[in-house]
Amino acid sequence: MREALRLARDAEAAGEVPVGAVVVVDGDVLGRGRNSPVGRCDPTAHAEILALREAASAAGNYRLEAATLYVTLEPCVMCAGALVTSRVKRLVFGSRDLRFGGVRSKFRVADSELLNHRVEVVEGVLAADCVELLQRFFRERR
């Protein structure tokens, strides 16, 4: 999660909402991502999506069945769907996203009994650090 926080700070420095994500398999980082939709002019360039793309490329497979994704903010519905599609084993996130959260706050996509795969969800890891980063970012822009 500390690496995800570092990536979130990189996103903030680039003027993006500070969210970072890391995909880990057997203790090795296979993918990293930071929010980049503004800089890439790509609405899908969320930290989780970029980390999953990099990890799938490194693994040579879109299925990441042994992977854990660490992310500073609760994934949105799009990213939660990508976790299910890629068969990620576990999601660890820091802060809930009360407005757009697709895993706990608004929807429960990642571990829905309606879907063909359920992701194990752990929340609140380094939550205070994740929340502080986001609050500072938005406070400075308002």
Image (spheres, rainbow, N blue to C red):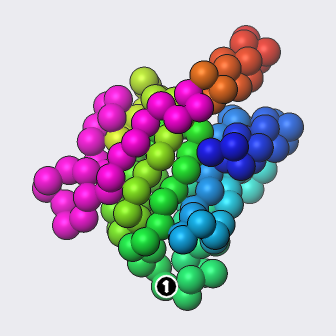
Residue 37 makes an appearance in the image: no
Q: Main secondary structure of the magenta part?
A: loop
- Residue sitting at x 86%, y 37%: 13
Q: Position of residue 133 (x, y in %)?
A: 70, 25
Q: Amino acid at mark 1?
A: Asn
Relative height, residue 71 to residue 105 (above, below): below
Viewer-nearest residue: 41 or 20: 20
Using residue 129 as the reference point, say whether residue 103 is left or right of it: left
Q: Label 1: state its secondary structure.
A: loop
Query: Which residue has dot 1 on it?
Result: 61
Foreground residue among 42 and 52 = 52
Residue at image x 77%, y 43%?
A: 6
- Quadrant, the C terminus: top right
Locate residue 76, reporting x and y percent.
44, 43
Q: Is residue 51 magenta?
A: no
- Is residue 111 located in the magenta-colored stretch of the structure? yes
Image position of 39 (left or right of 124): right
Q: In terms of image quadrants, where is residue 137?
A: top right
131 to the left or right of 7: left
Q: Which residues are magenta?
A: 104-127
Residue 94 position in % (x across, y down) = 53, 35
Foreground of the two, 32 or 25: 25
Instruction: Classify 39 as above or below 118.
Output: above
Q: Quadrant of the N terminus?
A: top right
Mark 1: give few (<14), some (14-19) or many (20+) Cα within 10 Å: few
